[in-house]
Amino acid sequence: MSKTIYYIGAGASYGKRDEKGAIIEGVPVVAEIPMEFAAFRKFIADAEIPTGYIQFQDFYQTTPEDVKREKQMMLTDIDDLQKGIQEHATIDTYARKLYLTRRFNEFKKLKDVLCSFFVWTQLEHKVDSRYDTFLANVLEESTLSLPKDISIISWNYDSQIETAYKAYRYNQGLPIYEKNIQGGWPSMPKGGRIFKINGSATFYDMSVVERIKETENETAAALQLILFYNTSRADTSSMGFLLRTHLSFAWEAAAHHDNLMNSLAETTVDTEQMVVIGYSFPFFNREIDRAILKAMPNLQKVYIQDINPSAVVQTINAALPTDKKINIVPISNCNQFYLPSEL
């Protein structure tokens, strides 16, 4: 269906930094997460709890006493995760260790804190402006949707592209598919599609970042994030809703894993070129990478856009099929997302 696939990783949401390295736009990369976590903790710790009832979206009202208790629980969980991060090479390593050793309560706590962290960092910083430029270039004028010849496969948790799209069509989002969608698997549109292999940093089937921004005048963002975090850990089905983090890891089991992979294969069967942006093909993801690339029988060319494309050229060879020759083109200019001549 889609002749061009954009295959994106953390570098696609890097954005801009000032002369001191502080984030101007985008989300933090792995090396920046420890320092950003300290700022995230301060954001939660400094949350002022007003007197009287506190409104949580359109879900329910709660009391200052309950929020104060939930705030302290969240801070304790953040401290536990910070300690775990310091003792391991990366968050992914720590998460995989918890999963393999069946420490599932700690594993769930890690995902909930990490989800909240990525929500916070996108409330704190502007969207990577390259998403806006990309959408301005590729959206169809008549429908403001992705053309059928372009789809996106993302390894990122963030909501950068969803937020950027709000400037084009506020009341309707792009078709996004990930394995933690609640309910049944949605039908596939005729236009381009977006697949998020690691799920999304949200607590339900839309961007929490945007929901918090829309209601910030009524309830402070920090309070909302505390309530999203704690409500996601409770069974609220009797109240008519259920919040759960949609953040996931590629190697983690999920109800819609087969649906995701089947829909991916349907989308990539006609793919002829792939644009890899800011993704390094790490060993953790190799099994999924190989399955996705195997489902591109017509792939002829791969553009690798990265500040160090030669390093990615080496790692992608471990994921590409070995039964045919694929032309690999390095692109080192990362000012805008690359638009290949085939488009």
Image (cartoon, rainbow, N blue to C red):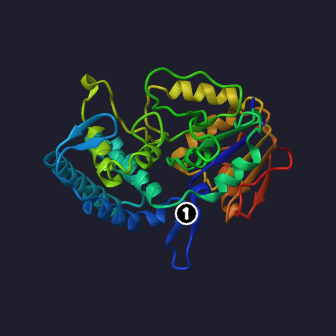
Query: For the point 56% across and 44% down, which residue is it?
Result: 162
Give the structural element (helix, strand or loop) at label 1: strand
Q: Residues within 10 Å of mark 1 (few under 14, many from 20)?
A: many
Mark 1: amino acid: Glu
Q: Position of residue 319 (x, y in %)?
A: 65, 44
Q: Position of residue 275 (x, y in %)?
A: 73, 48
Q: Quadrant of residue 16?
A: bottom right
Which residue lies under the disc numbered 1? 25
Answer left or right for 80 relative to 209. Answer: left
Above or below for 189 versus 247: above
Residue at the extreme right: 341
- Count of picture labels: 1
Answer left or right for 253 relative to 160. Answer: left
Residue 338 visible to the viewer: yes
Query: For the point 29% across and 41% down, which residue is it?
Result: 56
Residue 92 visible to the viewer: no
Answer left or right for 35 relative to 75. Answer: right
